[in-house]
Amino acid sequence: MKFTLKTMSLFTSFATVFSCFAQSGSNSFCDEYLRNVRKVEKITNMSIAIEQHGKTAYSFVEGDPDKQGKPFTAETQLQIASVTKIMTSTLIIRLVEDGKISLYDNVRRFIPEFPFDDVLILHLMTHTSGCQNKKGNFPKQKQLFYESMVREFPCDTQFLYYSNGYDVLADVIERISGMTIKEFGYKIIFEPLKMNHSEFSLRGGGDMRSTAEDLLKFSRHILDVRKTHKAGILKPCSVDLMFREHTRGRYDRTPAFFLKSETRVFGRYFGDLNSMESVGHAGASGCFLLLDPKYDLSIVILTNGSNTIQSDDANFIRINNLLMGQFAK
């Protein structure tokens, strides 16, 4: 749902009415602002937080009880949709670190039934494989899924967002590790980082559930490894790989993230106030995870509702601007 002029006027009104709060950085300003977004967008549940230098500066948690009457809290899992891809990428890079895979390996090396012999792991991670699939649900109809794959263009000649490519990557992870992605994700990421409210489902492209607090734990860990050069769930060189642009500047894409960009569609979700070092990923359930190394901070936006905010990237921009303007130091 696109923002209308009426919606824009509501945001303008809040900015005017609460300008004195904005100047002081009061939480009440952000609370009212986000309540209005939730009302306008008819969002069922919303959990938003910003963290800087290892400390949560602000969090907003508001939602409706579930069908059993259980209240919505900061520990209630939300579907994070394509933000899942960051975690799937982390697992792939861990396998790189362990010498079991290269980003330049052919996918068919690990999945013999994969229909194309020139698609690399990196192509799937950067959405430059040119692949699409016409039939089959992954992983329940895996054979049909692979049989129905088609090519829209030759590898590495264009960008085409291919969410199911990360399901293929999950299949690679499972075949190499001998574990389900749910088990491997728990072992490599969630258990070490004490992300107690996070779990993969069956797919690598968008089925994970998590909380804002857990995603802040992940982001802080990655930022700290990058900043201190001390190993964690990944070595510093591996985290460096996560942040490195891998499409020769054409699509602002790393093996794990989209880079902030003023021209690319996926790079415009970031706030105007975020640095050009920022990386992140949005999800179709109305969510966004942002890491800004320059300011040593991360922002998590999680929502689940009938009309979610992902329909207009400017909605993410405004919320990121709000949080940066109020709480970034």
Image (cartoon, rainbow, N blue to C red):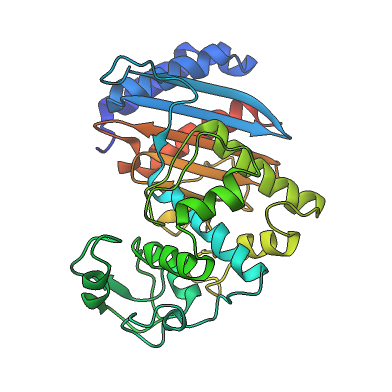
Q: Quadrant of residue 133?
A: bottom left
Q: Nearer the viewer, residue 102 or 156?
A: 102
User: Does residue 201 appear to the left or right of 329 in the view shown?
Assistant: left
Q: In this picture, is 205 found above or below 201?
A: below
Vertical arrangement, residue 300 with respect to residue 114, above or below: above
- Decide which of 180, 326 is in the foreground and name it: 180
Residue 231, image x and y in percent? 77, 54
State the residue at coordinates (60%, 74%): 100
Reply above or below: 20 against 128: above
Q: Is residue 219 visible?
A: yes
Q: Residue at x 60, y 29 (%)?
A: 325
Residue 260 at least partly seen? no
Q: Is residue 111 above or below residue 55?
A: below
* Occupied quadrant, residue 114: bottom left
Residue situated furthest left in the rendering: 135
Q: How many marks?
A: 0
In the picture as drawn, the residue positioned furthest to the bottom comes out as 117
Q: Position of residue 19 (x, y in %)?
A: 53, 15
Residue 51 position, x and y percent, is 64, 32
Q: Quadrant of the C terminus?
A: top right
Q: Residue at x 55, y 71 (%)?
A: 249
Q: Quadrant of the N terminus?
A: top left
Query: Can you give x and y, in whole percent of width and height, for residue 119 in the image?
Result: 41, 81
Residue at the limit of the structure toward the front, as seen here: 178
Q: Residue at the location (58% across, 44% down)?
A: 190
